Image (tube, grey):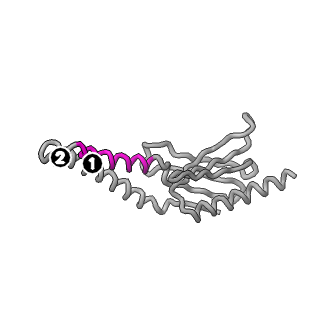
Amino acid sequence: MRLSNRKKTSVYSFINSLLAMFLIGGVGAFILEEYKFDVLGKESLLLIIVPVFIIILFYISGRQVFEYDSDGEALHFRNRNIIPFLQKPLSDEFPKYKLLKFEIINLFIIKRLYITISSKNSGSTILKYEISYLTRKEVDDLRFSLHKVVKTNNEKKS
């Protein structure tokens, strides 16, 4: 099964540009308010605080692009940000038989996928992916696919 929200990259880039313009407009309005108009008083700080808060929410939600491929004998996960220099992109590929368990955490606007794989050195390793920008259907499909792999692995061990 293949799952990807790469087609939405242009939407995320547009939102990012819109937020940047919103911040620049807020800073410009703040400067004009402070030095020219002086109508809002202390509330003029909201012209900067609100855009900064929205930008922080956008980036705290995690990497925007998530790709998953379970075709063949390996699982391949890729997770990257639309702005390459903000966070290092994640890319992991490992055989299906190494998958021990997975967990999807859903907290308000933040969704995370934790994958536990078997490792020769430490016994097991936990890999973390940010899936906040996946739709509910995509998360359900991902859960179904990973559950099928875990179930197959448990049957082979028995």
Give the number of marks. 2
* Tag 2: amino acid: Glu
User: In the shown orientation, is residue 148 left or right of residue 79?
Assistant: right
Prevalent SS, magenta region: helix
Q: Quarter of the image for the N terminus: give it.
A: bottom right
Q: Give the range drawn in magenta.
A: 42-59
Mark 1 neighbour class, 10 Å CA radius: few under 14, some 14 to 19, many 20 or more? many
User: In the shown orientation, is residue 152 left or right of residue 145?
Assistant: right
Q: Which of 80 and 103 is in front in this view?
A: 103
Residue 33: assigned label: 2
Label 2 element class: helix
* Tag 1: amino acid: Leu
Work out whether mark 1 precedes mark 2 in sequence or the reverse, and give the earlier one: 2
Residue 143: assigned label: none
Could you tell me residue 31's position as x and y percent?
Answer: 19, 44
Tags 1 and 2 touching, CB below 8 Å: yes
Could you tell me residue 143's position as x and y percent?
Answer: 66, 59
Q: Nearer the viewer, residue 26 or 45?
A: 45
Could you tell me residue 158's position as x and y percent?
Answer: 87, 52
Question: What's the CA distance linking mark 1 and mark 2?
Answer: 10 Å
Residue 47: assigned label: 1
Name the residue: 56% across, 52% down: 111
Could you tell me residue 27's position as x and y percent?
Answer: 24, 46
Mark 2 neighbour class, 10 Å CA radius: few under 14, some 14 to 19, many 20 or more? some
